[in-house]
Amino acid sequence: MSANIHGEMVYSFEKPMWHNITQPSLVPMKAEEILDARFKGGFAIHLRPVTVELNSQPVETGDFAIVRGVSPADPQELVFGYCSDRFHPLQPREIAQSFDANVKEPAETMAFLGKGECMFISWQLPKFEVTVGDEVEMFGIVKSGFDTLKGTQLITSIYRPICANTLAMAEGWAKRNSDGAGRGNVWKGKGVNKNLLRDVGYWMAHVQANAKREGEILQNFFGKLAKTPVRNDYEAKAILNDAFPNIENVSQYYPKELRERKEETTLDFNNGQEAIRVGIYDLFAGNGTAITPDFWGMLNATSEYFCHVQPSKRPIAESVMFGGRQKHTMQMVNVLSERAK
C-alpha cells in the first residue's frame, strides 16, 4: 500500500518509518529547518486569475486557480482547484514558521502528501505512565490542505503520523475520542478565514500549554483500565465475545441460488472471529509479553496480537498501522471503556 508521500518530502525524528522513503534524523529539528534542509525549501502556493475567451479576447472571470508551484518532487506547476477572492490559502512556510513560534518544540514528523495538496507536522506531547514502566505517547498534529476542500485541522492522538494512512489513523482516533475540551479534534478552519494563520497559531500554543491536562485525561482512562481486574476466564471470554462477536447465519432469507455462498461467507467470518478470540486469549492467559490480569492487560494482548501475531499478506510493519487491524483494536478499546464505567 502506498504511503502517498509527495516524492521524498517526509521527515521523522529518530524512529525509522515503515516505508523507508527517507532515513530518520538523529538530531531534533524545527519545522522551518526541515523545510529548508530536508525538503529543499518546499514550494509556494499561488492564486492566478482564471480567464476565458470572449469576443476573441481573454477576459478574467473573477475566479482564481490555486496553483502549486514547482516542488523538489515535481518540476511542473499544478492546479489544485479553483476559488473566489474570499479564499486565502496558507503557505507551507507560514505553517512551519507558525509551528516553530507557537509550539516551541522540535517536530516529531513532517510530510507533504499526494501531489503536495496536504501537509502535516506532528510534535510529541508529554508522555505518561499507566503502570510502572508502561508509557503512553501522545502527539499534537497540525494538518493543512492547499485546496478548497481540506482546510486546516489541529488534533491530538496516540498515533504518530508518518504517511497518509497513519495520519488517517490519528484522525480516526481523534474523532472517536473528542471531548470538546481540548482532546481529539481540537480545532478546524477554512481558507475563507482571513485570520486562519493567526488562529491556527493560537490553537497550537493552546494545545501545547494544555498538554499536561490532556495527558492526565488519558492517564486516568488507561489507569482505570489498569485498576479493573479481569476476574476469571469466563469474564475474559465474555469481553472477547463482545469485542469480536460472530454474526448470525441468515442464509435462509436469501434466494436459494445464493444461500450456499452466504453460508460459506458467514462461516469464514465466524471462523476468523474465533481465531482472533483464541489468539488474544492465548496471549492474555500467559503467552503474551508482560500482560497483566486486568483490562489494561487485555488491551495490550489485543495490540500484541494484531501487531505481531495475526498473519498478514502484506509486510507486517506496514499492515499493522491501518485498516482492519486498527479497527479491531478500537473495538476492544470501546468494549473495555464501556465495561470499566
Image: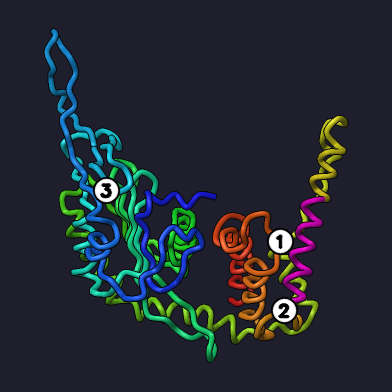
User: Where residue 123 sits: x, y (%)?
Assistant: 34, 70
Report the disc number at residue 190.
3
Q: Quadrant of residue 21?
A: bottom left
Identify the residue position indicated by label 1 in the image: 311
Q: Vertical placement of 231 versus 255: above or below?
A: below
User: Quadrant where the C terminus lies?
Assistant: bottom right
The residue under the point 15% across, 30% down is 49
Q: Are marks 1 and 2 in contact (CB under 8 Å)?
A: no
Q: Nearer the viewer, residue 341 or 334?
A: 334
Packing grade of label 1 (10 A; few <14, some 14-19, many >=20) is: few
Q: SS at mark 2?
A: helix
Q: Is residue 122 rendered to the left or right of residue 17?
A: left
User: Where residue 316 sits: x, y (%)?
Assistant: 62, 62
Identify the residue at the far bottom of this view. Answer: 132
Identify the residue position indicated by label 2 in the image: 284
The residue under the point 48% across, 79% down is 136
* Disc number lying in front (1 or 3): 1
**Magenta-drawn segment:** 268-284
Q: Amino acid at mark 1?
A: Pro
Packing grade of label 2 (10 A; few <14, some 14-19, many >=20) is: many
Does residue 289 appear in this view?
A: yes
Q: Amino acid at mark 2?
A: Phe
Give the CA distance from mark 3 to mark 2.
46 Å
Query: Disc 1 or 2, which lies upstream in sequence?
Result: 2
Q: Quadrant of residue 252?
A: top right
The residue under the point 28% across, 57% down is 39
User: Where residue 19 sits: x, y (%)?
Assistant: 49, 58
Q: Are marks 3 and 2 in contact (CB under 8 Å)?
A: no
Q: Is residue 292 rendered to the left or right of residue 266?
A: left
* Disc number lying in front (1 or 2): 1
